[in-house]
Image: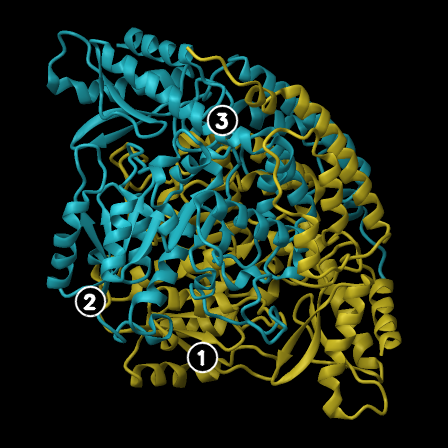
Chain colours: A cyan, B yellow
């Protein structure tokens, strides 16, 4: 019988945890107070090499005392998303309550591959997904899983689509078991769809692009010809992927028209609603996703418009049993029973085996803060973005790329007297100037060969005044 | 200009966060104290339907006050991994400090797809991976990424292997661009490898099984014939996957022999070290992974033997640039520069786009608690498992499946007088009895058609006395 090592027992000491925990909560609360008051930079910019030197891997052998000094430096040097001048990527400004749920999840570490390893979080996942399916208007019998991000989610849905519509056993059959497959995808789709298709071995032609209109929305009248072209190229089309909120401009594809088309041709209808499925929460904007209730599968990230920290992605299937077809597998050490269709052993239906207690944060926030908060966040950020777009249109020195469908606004600064040929370089320079000074965080994108500034108004604390200040800052930075 | 809604501003109130945060830290510290003192059940067992009713999705519209009562119920009803009688799956008993890092990560929510969205965590990831590569003995020029779990990690490595060794452009070429591929995989490999292969469209024959010996280790003398058989079947073998710690029994394959074989035949050498790569940390046990330094790719989960909460998986490549080949993709809204090989925009090389600040917890724990803690945890749990196996072998009423290579021990209770035909059912019943009473948590597996009890001695607080008590409890439960 061997005695336990003091360093190991100390590392699990509840009183150490209590002391550091209280200290950290104060550090984070103070940080949150400063940041929401607009103090300090949004992004305290430094090049990668600087941070690589600041946080070296020179780990000691023995304990060095407490972590709070290091964590203070981490907090100071990280990107401060709670700052109302953060209007960049589609990464949520997390609810502090959700972060506390993640503390609970990480300490409990209930792994969820099988029910026994995460009984509460498995039940919560089940119920949260039912609630989400209800919000979207999916019928009785729908179901799904939570997974680690929209890319994993879209891959999961496409694997189910492949199994359901390939017309052969693509899971076991191998590359020569049937004709080469393809999915019809608008040009505006997130890169992860083309990536998923290539991961599945379908190659570049595994994606057949559907033309988009001037608003970057899928053109439904082009669907028939796109389908015919794919068939002429020797491909078997199995699905259409529509965007509810495309990434670059936030365009919502006409889901009802796509649903009709898929029904007519027996194609799987997948909606990448990673960003925009949340529109269904808002009485004012839910018309944007009309038709989503007819989808065979939907991906919806709660870590985008639902104020959850990364990662929590719902993959919802119109027919819940499709969820079992994405990954048709067994492992005797895990799944002890005979019934491999048990919903409660979620690893049967997810890319992950071990997984975090993902549902806990969303369940707890819905339970405690109420559903209206989530509806309001969508309505208010969409409203704010529309007002911002109107001001851009009304100003003589800014150009709006396209009227926003949601809370993503692309625009460029066009100061008088500057030739068109210099505008692309100007946007790049302006963005760099603002973000390296820490005044604002926004991003950029290329649309039809030209560079645009891109903002996602995703921080519920951002106001009209903040966006006015952004335009002023851009003017001054020229 | 619209005023902000009170519910939204309240939800981000730093003082609300501070108050609930302090309360939760105390709740979790008290829970940790009780659990590490062996108070209360390991798993407070209840069937799925009970928890589905206990945590219904009856979310109110308006806020309902504070979350601590709900979180108390979550803590009480979850699986209590810090209990020293938790000897079940390969899911770590997380260091409380790591959970506090996850709180920091979740509040800051630095998404990491591109450097700007997670500057500190990107630098930490880079440095932690260099440190891990050093522990394994990988050469200068190695590199990799952190990803959401071992399944995603093995898929990432196999995608890189496909791109490097298929002999054609499997990424863009599609199913008919080259011959059907296969990987040689010991029968004992984790299910996610066969699953990855099927996701990539290679079908059932995408895996060519390598026979294992009486210790469930890959038989190197069978490799030549396995390779020849795959070729005869019309497959192009591109890789061998070896296990450093197989899942069912924790067997370590002979890595040096596999490395020699791969070198001879130009095959990619992948090591699934999700569980056992951590052996490299222990001076006493690092010989188990001799040869891992010759691998083309290695998967190593820090959320198994490194006491990290899920998920944090390292995918390491001998040649760091291979990391860019798994996902060859661009997205203009994300990757603004010209150089698509920038290491610091990690989404170029991961399945995830947005990702958590994964490295923070491991970096902070190594920095604060020292490296020796991690070596000790491996050494001590491996030692303890060997002593447990010896006691099983010495007892007349227990049978050891195989002497353990690491901290996974499979055995069965064989009370006198019970016919062999009833032993399988007995193990199932004994396990069920112990776990539903909450006395212990252990699992079961099927080896060569027979049911065995399976323990992973992964809790550094588990002692010889706890394992003696487990055997006594099994005897009493007959």
Chain under disc 3: A
Badge number at residue A407: none
Q: Which residue is mark 1?
A: B209
Give above or below for B3 relative to B328.
above
Q: Do the numbered discs 1 and 2 sit on residues whose CB atoms are within 8 Å?
A: no
Q: Which residue is mark 3?
A: A376
Q: Which residue is mark 2?
A: B177
Looking at the rendering, in which quadrant would you find the C terminus of chain B? bottom right
Q: Position of residue B137 (x, y in %)?
A: 51, 55
Give above or below for B429 relative to A157.
below
Mark yes or no: residue B402 visible: no
Q: Nearer the viewer, residue B46 or B452?
A: B46
- As measured in the structure, the alpha-carbon distance from the residue carrying label 1 to the one carrying label 2 is 25 Å
Give above or below for B423 relative to B45.
below
Tell me what residue is drawn at x 63 percent, y 73 percent: A336
Q: Nearer the viewer, residue B241 or B355?
A: B355
Q: On the image, which quarter does residue A364 sit in?
A: top right
Mark 3 neighbour class, 10 Å CA radius: few under 14, some 14 to 19, many 20 or more: many
Q: Is residue B98 left or right of residue A250?
A: right
Chain under disc 2: B
Mark yes or no: residue A386 visible: yes
Tell me what residue is drawn at x 39 percent, y 86 percent: B225
Q: Do the numbered discs 3 and 2 sit on residues whose CB atoms are within 8 Å?
A: no
Looking at the rendering, in which quadrant would you find the N terminus of chain B? top left
Classify mark 2: helix, strand or loop. loop
Classify mark 1: helix, strand or loop. strand
Q: Position of residue A58 (x, y in %)?
A: 58, 38
């Amino acid at each position: 019988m061997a005695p336990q090592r003091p360093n190991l027992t100390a590392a699990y000491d509840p009183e150490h945890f209590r002391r550091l925990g209280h200290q950290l909560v104060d550090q984070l609360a103070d940080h949150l107070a400063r940041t929401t008051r607009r103090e300090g930079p949004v992004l305290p910019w430094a090049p990668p090499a600087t941070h690589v030197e600041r946080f070296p891997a020179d780990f000691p052998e023995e304990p060095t005392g407490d972590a709070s000094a290091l964590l203070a430096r981490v907090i100071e040097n990280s990107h401060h998303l709670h700052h109302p001048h953060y209007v960049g990527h589609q990464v949520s400004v997390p609810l502090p309550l959700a972060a506390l749920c993640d503390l609970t999840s990480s300490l409990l570490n209930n792994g969820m591959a099988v029910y026994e390893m995460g009984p509460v979080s498995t039940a919560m996942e089940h119920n949260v997904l039912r609630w989400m399916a209800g919000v979207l208007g999916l019928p009785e019998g729908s179901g799904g899983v939570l997974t680690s991000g929209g890319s994993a989610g879209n891959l999961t849905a496409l694997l189910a689509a492949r199994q359901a519509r390939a017309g052969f056993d693509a899971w076991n059959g191998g590359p020569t078991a049937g004709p080469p497959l393809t999915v019809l995808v608008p040009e505006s789709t997130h890169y992860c769809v083309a990536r998923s298709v290539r991961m599945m071995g379908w190659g570049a032609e595994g994606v057949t692009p559907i033309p988009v209109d001037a608003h970057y929305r899928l053109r439904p009248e082009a669907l028939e010809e796109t389908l015919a072209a794919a068939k002429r190229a020797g491909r078997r089309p199995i699905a259409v992927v529509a965007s509810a909120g495309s990434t670059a401009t936030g365009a919502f594809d006409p889901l009802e028209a796509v649903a009709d088309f898929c029904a007519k041709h027996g194609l799987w209808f997948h909606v990448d609603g990673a960003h925009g499925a949340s529109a269904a929460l808002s009485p004012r904007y839910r018309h944007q996703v009309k038709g989503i209730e007819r989808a065979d599968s939907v991906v919806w990230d709660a870590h985008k418009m639902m104020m959850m920290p990364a990662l929590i992605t719902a993959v919802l299937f119109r027919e819940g049993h499709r969820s079992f077809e994405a990954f048709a597998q067994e492992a005797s050490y895990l799944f002890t029973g005979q019934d491999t269709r048990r919903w409660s052993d979620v690893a049967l239906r997810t890319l992950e085996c071990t997984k975090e207690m993902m549902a806990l944060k969303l369940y707890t926030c819905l339970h405690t803060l109420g559903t209206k908060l989530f509806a309001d966040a969508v309505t208010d950020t969409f409203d704010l973005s529309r007002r911002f777009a109107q001001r851009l249109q009304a100003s003589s020195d800014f150009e709006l790329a396209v009227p926003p469908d949601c809370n993503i606004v692309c625009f460029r600064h066009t100061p008088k007297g500057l030739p068109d040929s210099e505008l692309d370089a100007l946007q790049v320079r302006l963005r760099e100037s603002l973000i390296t000074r820490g005044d604002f965080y926004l991003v950029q994108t290329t649309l039809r060969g030209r560079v645009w500034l891109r903002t996602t108004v995703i921080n519920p604390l951002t106001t009209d005044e903040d966006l006015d200040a952004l335009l002023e800052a851009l003017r001054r930075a020229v």
